[in-house]
Image: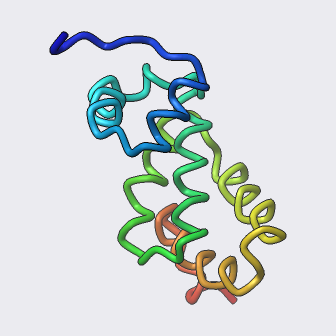
Amino acid sequence: MKGVVVALDYVGRLRRLAISDSQAADQAAEAGWASSSLSPKTLALARLAALVAIGASEPSFGDLADAAVGAGASPDEIVDVLVGLRVVVGAPRIVAAAPKVALALGYDLDGVD
């Protein structure tokens, strides 16, 4: 049935992710935030964490930091994500990401004494 979004439990969604079901991924993307059991704030913070984990470039952080703040995350919570990620991704990734996150939040760490 074209255009019908079927609600799946987590097992069904995992199965579809495991087989790279592009139709399911497209449906989830079209549904946006509402398709997730996560709050918009939590999802935005998770996406920022993913950028840190992959070592994303500076421009990537701006929109997601804006989305996180727009969804109710404070700058303190965003920094707490970096602190919490350190044990998973390592200090070098956090050191590299901190200035990018700072700029996304409107702070230039190089200008701070």
Image-quadrant location for residue 78: bottom right
Q: Classify 75 as above or below 32.
A: below
Residue at left offset 64%, top offset 53%:
75
Residue at left offset 57%, top offset 79%:
99
Find residue 71 and report its horizontal and vertical position in percent.
51, 34
Q: Horizontal placement of 76 versus 87: left or right?
A: left
- The residue furthest right is 87
Q: Let me know if residue 102 appears in the view.
A: no
Residue at left offset 19%, top offset 10%:
1
Find residue 42 and report its horizontal and vertical position in percent.
62, 37
- Color scheme of the displayed model: rainbow
Residue at left offset 84%, top offset 70%:
87
Q: Classify 88 as above or below 15.
A: below
Q: Classify 101 as above or below 27.
A: below
Find residue 98 and report its horizontal and vertical position in percent.
63, 75
- The residue furthest left is 2
Image quadrant containing the C terminus: bottom right
Find residue 14 and report its horizontal and vertical position in percent.
55, 34
Q: Let me know if residue 29 appears in the view.
A: yes
